[in-house]
Image (cartoon, rainbow, N blue to C red):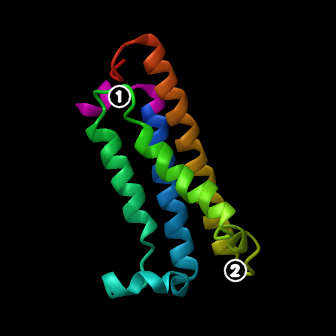
Amino acid sequence: MMFRRLNRGTVVSLAGLLVGIGGLLVQWAADPSMFSAGEQPFGIAFPPGILFILGAGLLTLGTARWWWHPVFAVLISFWIVVVGGLAGQLTPNLFSPNLGTVAGNVIMTVGLALAGIAGVVGMIRARRSGTPSRA
């Protein structure tokens, strides 16, 4: 099975991405109108971030033979949490009157931060050991 070959850092990083998706699902359930911009391509108000996070997770799995494979989880986490925070996209949701929006945003941010940190640590360890990611 593929998951047995993944190192702990990769598994934690992928779990963080799943938690991030869970946070987006909580936000979507709490306030679907928040994602009205995603309505154009999907026909319903859908959080497009789910597809980006899912894509990063699939790329991470698909490149698991190389030491640098968690870079995709790191990049999507950085983009959503750091760039989204600097652009002022995350903070309004943290102070929303809708408790579901706040909870979902916190869950998403914590999950993606975990994914990013675990990905960086995993890449450093794999590079230093000189072995592929399958530990």
Between 78 and 118, the one lying in front of the other is: 78
Q: Can residue 15 be seen?
A: no
Q: Amino acid at mark 2?
A: Asn
- Residue 45, x across and y down, in percent: 43, 84
Indicate whether residue 109 is drawn in magenta: no
Report the Cα–Cα distance between label 2 and label 1.
38 Å
The residue to which callout 1 is attached is 6
Q: Amino acid at mark 1?
A: Leu
Residue at 60% over, 47% down? 113
Indicate whether residue 4 is drawn in magenta: yes
Pick the quarter of the image with the N terminus.
Answer: top left
Residue range highlighted in magenta: 1-9
| Disc with the residue nearer the chain's start (2 vs 1) | 1
Q: Secondary structure at mark 1?
A: loop
Q: Residues within 10 Å of mark 2 (few under 14, many from 20)?
A: few
Residue at 42% over, 81% down? 38
Q: Can residue 129 be seen?
A: yes
Residue at 45% over, 52% down? 18
For residue 104, above or below residue 121:
below
Identify the image quadrant of residue 103. bottom right
The residue to which callout 2 is attached is 98
Residue at 48% over, 30% down? 9
